[in-house]
Each structure stands twice: as C-alpha cells, then as structure tokens.
Image (cartoon, grey):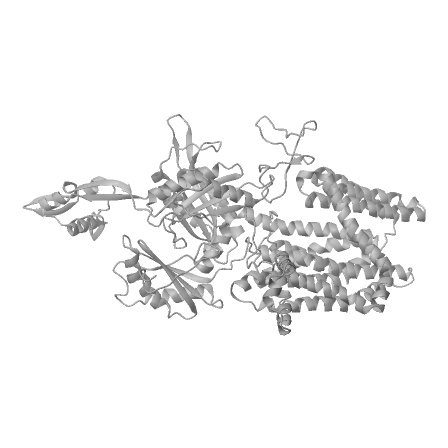
Amino acid sequence: EKLLVFMLVLLIIAWGVMVAPFDWNLGGFPRDPVPVDAIPDIGENQQIVFSKWSGRSPQDVEDQISYPLTVVLLGIPGVKSIRSYSMFGFSSIYVIFKEEVEFYWSRSRILEKLNSLPSGTLPQGVKPALGPDATALGQVYWYTLEGRDEKGNPTGGWDLNELRTIQDWYVRYALLSVEGVSEVASIGGFVQEYQIDVDPDAMRAYGVTLPEIFQAVKMTNVDVGARTIEINKAEYVIRGLGFIKNLDDIKNTVVKVKDNVPIYVKQIAQISLGPALRRGALDKEGAEAVGGVVVVRYGENPLKVINNLKQKIKDISPGLRKKTLPDGTVSQVTIVPFYDRTGLIYETLGTLNDALRDEILVTIIVVLIMLLHFRSSILVSGLLPLAVLMCFIAMKLFGVDANIMALSGIAIAIGTMVDMGIVVCENILQHVRESHHRENYLEVVHSAASEVGGAITTAISTTIVSFLPVFTMTAAEGKLFKPLAYTKTFALLASMIVALIIIPAFAQILFTSKIKWKKLRSLRNVTLILAGVFFSFWLTWHAGVVLIGLGGYYLIEPNLPELWQKRISLVVNMAAVLFVAVLLTHTWLPLGPELGFWRNYLFVIVVIGSILGILQIFLYFYQDVLAWCLGNKTKFLAVPFLVVLFALTTWLGFAKTFAFVPKTLSLVGVDPQTVHRNKLWSKLRHTFPPLSKEFMPPLDEGSFLFMPTTMPHASIGEALDILQKQDKAINSIPEVESAVGKIGRAESPLDPAPVSMIETIINYKSEYRTDKDGNLLLFKTDPQSGNFIRDEKNQLIQSERGKPFRQWRPQIKSTKDIWDEIVKVAQIPGVTSAPYLQPIAARIVMLQSGMRAPMGVKVKGPDLDTI
C-alpha cells in the first residue's frame, strides 16, 4: 500500500517540521518547536531563599537569619543538603533537593514552611522570599542602556541616575512581560532616594530625638481616607493627600510642636536627593554603565524566549527617552546586548545541520562508488532527513530538550542510520538485477527486504539495549548523558522504521518502475531542465546543474546504443562523485579555509578515494585473506591481542597496565625498585601516561568569563577602579569584540557575589568572519595582489568566489592564545589571576559546588580563630 506509506511520509514531514528545534520562519505554518539550549543544565535541583536585612554585618545575618532559617528548612521532605551565604545586608540560602523531587513542588513546600515560621524566629522587618523559578544557567541575555544617535553611534549625555531610573521603571517591567521570562535584574548606576542628614546639635537644641524624626516623616508620607459627604445630591469622598512628591514636602514636615511653635525637619536636617547604598556596579570598556540580566524560567525554551525578548525590545525602543545634547545631537536611550546566548544556540543547531549535510554528501559518494547506482544514493540520502524529523517528534513527545549533547546523539547515529538504508537498498538492488525481469517486482522487493529485516532489527536492538545503563544514571551524570542516549535511541528506531517500511516502498518505484508514455517521459525531462534553470538563478546553482544534467541525459538516452548507455552511466556516476565532492569541500574545508578551495578539494578526493580504494582492494582479496586467517589462527589472533594491549597501555598508562611485572619479579627475589629505576621502564612510563579525564567536555562558547578577585576588604570605589583598568586593557586586544565587567551583585537572589568579586564577560571575534549561524563568509579579493576589496564605506564585499577574512593576528592560533593575552594585560597588583572559564561552564560549576572555579578547597571549623 504505497499510497499509505506516502501519506505517512507526508505526516512525518509536517509533524517533524512543526516541532523541529530550528528557528524556521514558515509563514502561517504552525510551529511548536522542541525547547533548545546550548548545553544541558546539570546543576543541582535547588531553590534559593533570599532575605534582606540592610546595614547588618555578615555575622549578625548569619546568627539571626541564615542559621535559624537553615534549621527550619532542613525539615522539608526531599531535602538533600543546604548551604548558605551570609553577606553584608543579606542572606542567600540554597536548599538542594533530591533529583526525583519536582521543581515546582519543592517551591510550594518552601513557601509553606516560610509562611508558618513561629513568631520571633527572625528579626522584626525581615521577610524571607523565594528566589525566581529559574537557575543561574537561565541568565541568557545581558544588556546595557546607552545613549545612541539615529545611526547607532554612542553619544553619551545620560547620567547613571537617569539610566538606572529608566531601567528600573520602564525597561525592566516591559521585559518582565515577555512570556517565559522569570526575572529581570538591574545592575549598575545609582538608585535615587530622599536623604535626610540630621544635625545633632540642632536636634539637641530643639529637644528632638531620632525616633521622632523617623515617625514624623513616616506618618507624613501617607494618604488617608475619611467618610463621604453629600452636596447637591452628589457624593464626594473625603481624602487627605500626604504622599511625598518633592524635597519641600519633607522639609516642611512638622516633627513636634514646642510652646505652640512647630519644629520642621528643615530646621534640624539637610534634605537632598542622593544615591542609595550599592553593592554592585557595571563597567563597559572602562566607563561605568547601567544594564540588566534577563533570566529564563525553568523548563522554558530559551531560544523562543530570547526571540520574543528581542521583539519586545524592538517594540519598546521607539518609546525610550530622547534628549537633545548641547551640540544638537539627538540622543536616545538604546538597549545594547553584550551577552546573547542565541549565537551559541544557533552554532549548536548548525553542528547538526553540518553533520546531516556532510553525511548525506558522503553517503551519495559511497553509494555511487560502491554500487554505481545513482537512484540508490538519492533514496538513502533523501530519506535520511526523514529519520531525523522522526527523532524530533520523539523528542517532543518524551520531553527531551535539544542541546549539544542531545543533538550529538543524532549526529553520532546518522552513520548507523545510513547503514540501515544502504543494507536494504543494496539487497533490493541485487535481487532486482538477479531477477532479469522474469519475476513480479513486488515479490522481489518484499523478499529482499524481508531477508535483511531480521538482521537489521537485531543490530538495532543490541545497540539500544547497550544504552540501558545510561538511562539509570542520576544527578549530573544523568542530566549530561541521558539526552544523548535518548536521541540516539530515537534515531536508531526511526532509521529502522525508515529502512524496513518506507525504503522498500520507494525502492520499488525508483528501481523497477518505468514511464511508458513517450510524451510523459518528455514532459518529465523538460520539467527537470526547467527546474534546474530555476534553481540555478533563484536558489543554488549546484542543484540547478544536477537537474539540468539529468534532464538532458534522459532526453538523449533512448537514442543511444546499450553499450554507450552503460559507459555514459559510469561517467555520470563518476561526475556525480566529483560534483558531490565539490559540495562536501565547500562545507567541510578540512585543511582550513586559508589554504583555499582546490587544496581542500584535492585532500577530500584523496582521503575518500583512499578509504574506498582500500575497501575495494580488501573486498577483492577478502576470500584469500579469510582463508589465510582461518588456516593460521594463532598468528592472526596475535594481532587483535597486541591491539588490545596497546589500547590498554594508552588508556590506563604503561605503569598500571604492566604493574604485574614488578610484583611477579618480587616473587623470585628481584627488588621491585630495581625495575622502577630501569631506564627503559622509566622511559616507557613517561611515553605512555594514562589518558586525562574530564567530566564535562570543554565547549567553545565564543566568550570568556574573567573572574579575578581583589582583597576582601577592598572598597567599591577601589574595586571599580581595578575593573575599569582591566576592561580598558582587555578591550585593547584586537581579537576582543567587547569586555563588560561587573563587581558585586545584580539585584537578584541568583547573584550573591561580594564587591571583591569581578565578573567580566569577554566576547571575542571568531577566527574567520561568519554569519549569525556560524557559516563562513567569503569576500571579494583583488586577483593581482590578493588583498580584499572594500566599498566606498570601507566595508568588505561578499562574494561566493571570494576568500574568508581572518580576524585574528597571525600569532593567535587558538582561543587559548586569546585567553593568555587577556591574562597578561589584566595583571594588576593586589588582584588574583583567574582560571580559564566560560559563562555557561562557570555557572554550572558554581551551581554544583557553590564555588567559582573548577577546583577548590573548603576548610570547616567551629570558628574563624580555630580555622
């Protein structure tokens, strides 16, 4: 029932496109994509309880808030551990739950406990609050507010108080309304407040106490309501309006009356507007700035939230304040991002795109060379994306988010998925060739597919069963590796369905069906040529050339002798191989873009040709090789034994693999130390050390997080001065795109950083200029000198036949070199160095351990003196 199979394929395509994690704009087509982020959140299952107690020392906060709350919260069901930080003026308590505890259920239990605290547990006025329903990994978008002109050039003209006011009372509220945003925290600038500086001498002269001033100002700043009165059959509400609106309202506040003479606040104090105490600041390239951080809600789709956020920013930008500067320039407040995770997410998705595209091209080459059958390569490679779409559907149904680990599972499984299709196609093609048109093709295809169906099912089943231990992993290990296991399992099951159900149906049509009507054949050929012309001019010339070539060949094929048809078929297959190798070279560039296209093309041809040539030679001599191996089992089995021994030596190290040698010699009276001091033993031990181990694979996030610390008692002014000097030095590095630093904390429970802690997000340029998806861009060059050609605005000119533009200096070979430059220029006396960190990796480390470094030491004791 090929019609049902075709309808199934259409259903899979429609459903798969609807849930695919890619940021596709399909017009009115409904989209509900799989949530996508750069890497999985492997942090602890934790909630934050934040308590503010202004002006109190860390010891007071510890004794009166952190300790009592920790004792109370330990009684919540499912709690694994609790850690707390007591800082100047606030307390952060991290309640870590067991992995099986549901995220929002744990929040409700904490709220119940906080609402039922016994009277007197906490100091008066302290109200503990639950942190946002997010993790620190949800900090996906950082931005600054800057004055810009119509062309987007920085203008200045805005003081830090104005920018912070706009951030707190306009931008923050607008961004909070975006669906999926949990919190928008402000950082930098000055919060405006009314300040009353009392004069002790005046207070003593008038006989006024501080509590009286406090109470008078408090009672003045209030609206009161009385009853209603009726005048001319209309009802009026009696109100007393007392909210403070300006400084004069405070100045004219009566503190007390003495001998029928009122004593005003202005007589005993200086009243002014001033900045509130701040425990954090933001700096951009050496100048103080105001900004914020957007935190995505737990379980939301970060890519979707960021796109909605950008749309909201676009909507509110025209309404942000403007002012005309003294030189006549119109400056408008503009939201300028300095950390945006969409770039990393797009590169993550691009990895799957590249893997899928390259696998399809390699599949075409292998099938064309090994089977010399163009239709088989088209069938296998054409149905490969179908299996990937089926995998996306399963991810949506089972709630598996798309990230680098999950997408790696699909990329790894693509090779196996291709294998299934090749096995079925090759067997069907072999049976069709052997039938010599004497049998019913339907039965031939059915027999061929059934013949290998059992072997394919067994092969897939063993691979899936081998993943079962991964599904039992818990904690960080489970969060990291389960997505890969899920997606590879989905991909293998999808490939089995495609290989055993869909490929046979399409194979019968492609391998055995012929168009009998001459006019219909001519219409097909003309359609192919016209489609090729359309593709060449409006889409991509590569596909256009292929379609035009196919259409032209099919037009002249009936007039050719059978011998010429076979020869032309061979030539077409080889031409197709060379052409596909061109496409593969464009996307792969294995030797690097700086060596040009033709060297890379030659390398691709040599590598693939060598591998396939070796395989062909092996197939040619296989019977003789097999006969020798069976006749000389001992000699042959020595080869895999040596391979295993060498592998163990590389993995465990020479000393551990051959640790039995000194022990064995000691039994016959030889001192083991004699063996260890032997020069050959020592040389082998150093030549074959054990492989290093890393739990979290290092990922290139495209940005660094530079986190040195100053002395713990450094003032905010000193820390800010250090930060500005470092940011200026870092921003002077040619490879650095921007450097924005933060000291202290943003206004968020997710950020308990002290003033002495510096966090600088450094965005560096990619090695070669790319687009937003990470695809390499090519630019026009002068054929004579090889230099890049620029337009009248001194901008590079894109060209498909151009060369890539390298943005790094010749001595910079890798991102590690950029980091070394940063560490070198950022050295300041009194400031520690910083470990090699990236924003997401650092957040994961801090979520897991409460530390901001890959390795740390915690010293515990009864008090500081003992420690």
Figure quadrant of the C terminus: bottom left
Question: Between residues 779 and 814, which one lies in front from this camera angle?
Answer: 814
Residue at 57% x, 69% y is 472
Q: Is residue 126 visible?
A: no
Residue 102 in picture, x, y percent from top left = 47, 66
Q: Is residue 491 above or below residue 699?
A: below
Please tell me which residue lies in front, 211 or 397. Answer: 211
* Number of on-image labels: 0
Q: Position of residue 569 (x, y in %)?
A: 87, 48
Instruction: Please provide percent x and percent y for residue 787.
Output: 65, 29
Image quarter of the N terminus = bottom right
In this view of the protein, which residue sits in the foreground, 737 or 138? 737
In the image, farthest residue toward the bottom: 667
**Residue furthest left as drawn:** 259
On the question of residue 605 being in view, the answer is yes
660 displayed left or right of 59: right
731 above or below 300? Answer: above
Question: Viewer-proximal residue, 41 or 31?
Answer: 41
Spot occupied by residue 809 in the image (x, y as percentages of width and height):
58, 36
Tell me if 543 is positioned left or right of 308 in this view. Answer: right
Q: Quadrant of residue 447?
A: bottom right
* In the image, residue 449 above or below residue 218: below
Residue that appears at 34% across and 40% down: 161
722 relative position to 445: left or right:
left
